[in-house]
Image (spheres, grey):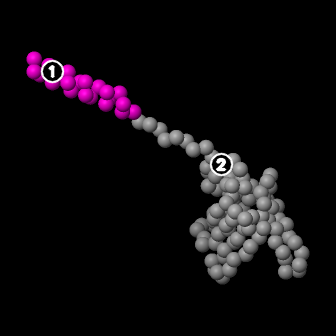
Amino acid sequence: MKQVLKLILISLILFPLALGCQKQEPEEIPLETDPAKIIIGKWRQTKRNNINVGFSNNYTEYLIDSINQAYFAESGNFMYWKYWVDSILTKEFYHTSGNIIRMKFDYTFSNKNNQLKLDI
């Protein structure tokens, strides 16, 4: 009788625990869809003309205030452009000739917004 009571008591304790033990999948955070927000941050070039370029200390950084700064590790120099994003990415800078140069790029984000592909 004592063993039956122990068995019932153990069953009453373990049964609710068994019901409450389920693997819970992490919630999927929705990806940002606004390109003006996605582009903010540092980006390193990994390919040029679909050819891997390997790791580089050079980077381009898109800042919140619509400034794009590029860092060139070999010289330690920075270059700055103004940029804006809508259906295309546009970069604008003043050339030494005094002319304003505008470059327009088609862009694609991939790999959960961790890769940026620019096409002229």
Query: Which residues lie in the magenta part?
Result: 1-22
Label 1: element kind: helix
The residue carrying pointer 2 sits among few (fewer than 14), some (14 to 19) or many (20 or more) residues within 10 Å by Cα, namely few
Residue 32 numbered mark, or none = 2
Kind of residue indicated by mark 1:
Leu
Relative horizontal placement of residue 87, taking residue 4 as reference (left or right): right
The residue carrying pointer 1 sits among few (fewer than 14), some (14 to 19) or many (20 or more) residues within 10 Å by Cα, namely few
Residue 51 in sight here: no
Kind of residue indicated by mark 2:
Glu
Residue 61 at what x, y percent from top left? 67, 67
Label 2: element kind: loop
What residue sits 87% from the left and 72% below the top? 100
What residue sits 69% from the left and 58% below the top? 39
* Secondary structure that dominates the magenta span: helix
First reached walking from the N terminus: tag 1 or tag 2 = 1
Residue 6 in sight here: yes
What residue sits 80% from the left and 52% below the top? 87
Residue 53 numbered mark, or none = none
Q: Nearer the viewer, residue 34 or 5?
A: 5
Marks 1/2: CA distance?
Answer: 57 Å
The image shows residue 109, relative to residue 67, as above or below, that is: above
The image shows residue 118, relative to residue 58, as above or below, that is: above
What residue sits 31% from the left and 27% below the top? 16
Residue that carries the numbered disc 1 in the rendered image:
5
Q: Quadrant of the N terminus?
A: top left
State yes or no: residue 116 in magenta. no
List the single residue furthest toward the top: 1
Residue 110 at what x, y percent from top left? 65, 51
Residue 74 at what x, y percent from top left? 64, 80
